[in-house]
Image (cartoon, rainbow, N blue to C red):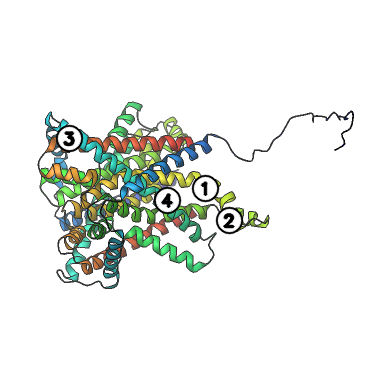
Amino acid sequence: MNSDIQQVTTFFNKKRFRLTVLILILGMAYVGASFGLGFQTQSLLGVQDGMIWLLKNFVPNATSNGYWSEILQQLYRTFLVAVTSTTCAAVVSLFLAILGAKTLTVSKALSWLIRGFSSLMRNIPIVAWAMILLFSFKQNDLTGFLALFFMTLGFLTRAFMETIEDFGTEKIQALQATGATYLQVIFQGLLPEVAVALLTWVLYMIENNVRDATLVGLLTGTGIGFIFNLYFKSLRYGAAGLVVLSVIILVVTVELISNLVGRLLA
Amino acid sequence: MIKPDNPVTLPTQAPTGPHFSIPLRFRDRRRVTILLTLMVLSVITLSTLPLMMPTDFKLSEAVVSFLENIKIMFLQPSLTNTSFMSLLIALGQSILLAFLTTLIGSVIAFFFALASTRRLAPTALILGIQSFMAVIRAIPTVLWVLIYSVVFGLGANAAVIGITFHSVAYLTKVYADSMDELSPDIIDTMQAMGLKKGAIIRQAVIPYLIPSYLSWTFIRFEINFADAIAVGAAAGAGGIGYQLFMSSSFYFNFHEVGVMVYLIMAFAIVLEVISYRLRMMTNSH
């Protein structure tokens, strides 16, 4: 009886000790990181100041109502760029993923090549993409489209490849045993099976790209990101508030639609 | 053609019993949804693509100069305005920024997630927190940082708070989702044993969910690293993103951009390898 109680206390003591050590380590890391960055912890207490400032200044006023038509037009263009770049990237990466997936590939070397390519594409920061493209393609929608396209290409190729590899080799071998050709295996066996998963990935990427399109716009001077920057830096906060509001509405709408489609697919 | 005078019709016997037919195609809701979604996406894409090309634009020239820059970036990286050491420090700052925001974000998000999981919280609270978080998530990180840099002044404070905002909103959602997956039996049993909520959280919820927390937090760390670079460039918040922005849009020095991109890529690939290992570990359990 006594030893039981002892065991329980040692169990909990050990647990407590481990927790204390973990908290100590993380706390030290926190202090070190904030020192290294020059971050003052008390500014965490100032979060509500930002919120109050936001509510005070960003509330659209009478003059900012005149900006609606311009904002809506840019919002629409940004949305189109986000969707188009995702769809185009999805088509290319489906092709690449089928060629590169370990279960389907024609050669190991090709598979590694495609893997390396997609890793390169998604690990080059979007800032670098935007800047390099801006230099050659100048300030227009095409620049934003291409920056998002390259980024999405990297992500979707990896995601599609993993989805296809999860499909397994058994089903592919079974189909091949019935005499199906390579194309038949892909179009009759693989694609119908993985279509739902692939589409879910595409929807997720569209959601993401709508948000990233704002960032790219800010850097390349197009779309909704650009006009936010313009209004914000010229202290037209009411109009900037409208931009934020319209971005919220767009992103939440896209999220709701993609949730709905996701539920219909499930 | 000879036709028989009175054609004999043989009464064909319809098979008795249940009638089976093998459906060759699934005409269910899922199929319709897939087709409709694909159709909408392709209509949008095909109607937008021709409009994308600006007027008076020489595509071939742009492509050639783009390829030229890519070549300069990747094949001839070199430094002129900054030293390698200062770039390493800048990269370190971006990493610290990502680390700090992930740490603060995950601690705060954990409590929000507890208050917004179906297992432990009332419905009104769940709906309130989740819609608030959806709104915060909808605003891109850069905008948060820009807004906070007006309040706190440009610098680390604004960057940390801005990225933390988005991290909290994201992590609250994924933490709450993984808590929802926790089987209700465990919590019911512990409640039946008379344990208080605090004890249930400490002894059941946390130990059970540690693997999924770790992997989600790590994913967020990767996202935050990318965000730290973007924020440095677009909001002038320092770190390697700022350097990248300066050398690509002020000095137009693509040799330097190449060095920075290589540095960033090296760290990002290390992160990817770690996350791959983590996934293998959690999968094998």
Question: Dividing the picture into quarters, in which one does residue B68 lie?
Answer: bottom left
Q: Earlier in the sequence, mark 2 or mark 3?
A: 3
Mark 1 burial class by Cα count in 10 Å: few <14, some 14-19, many 20+: some
Where residue B253 appears, as percent x and y from the top left, is 19, 67
Mark 1–mark 4 Cα distance, whole angstroms, equals 14 Å
Q: Earlier in the sequence, mark 3 or mark 1?
A: 3
Q: Residue at x 38, y 55 (%)?
A: A153
Q: Earlier in the sequence, mark 1 or mark 4?
A: 4
Q: Earlier in the sequence, mark 2 or mark 4?
A: 4
Q: Earlier in the sequence, mark 1 or mark 2?
A: 2
Mark 2–mark 4 Cα distance, whole angstroms, equals 19 Å
Where residue B161 appears, as percent x and y from the top left, is 19, 46
Residue B32 in the image: above or below residue B285: above
Mark 4–mark 3 Cα distance, whole angstroms, equals 35 Å
To the question of a shared chain for discs 3 and 1, the answer is yes
Mark 2 burial class by Cα count in 10 Å: few <14, some 14-19, many 20+: few
In this orientation, does residue A124 appear?
A: yes
What amino acid is labelled 1 in the image? Answer: Val
Question: Which of label 3 and label 1 is nearer to you?
Answer: 3
Q: Which residue is mark 4?
A: A90
Q: Which residue is mark 3?
A: A67
**Number of the label disc, if any, that sits on residue A183:** 2
Where residue A127 appears, as percent x and y from the top left, is 25, 56
Task: Give left or right: position of B259 versus B181.
Answer: left
Q: Are marks 3 and 1 in contact (CB under 8 Å)?
A: no
Circle 3 — which element?
helix
**Number of the label disc, if any, that sits on residue A194:** 1
In this orientation, does residue A29 appear?
A: no
**Number of the label disc, if any, that sits on residue A246:** none
Name the chain under label 2.
Answer: A
Mark 4 burial class by Cα count in 10 Å: few <14, some 14-19, many 20+: many
The residue at the far front in this view is B1
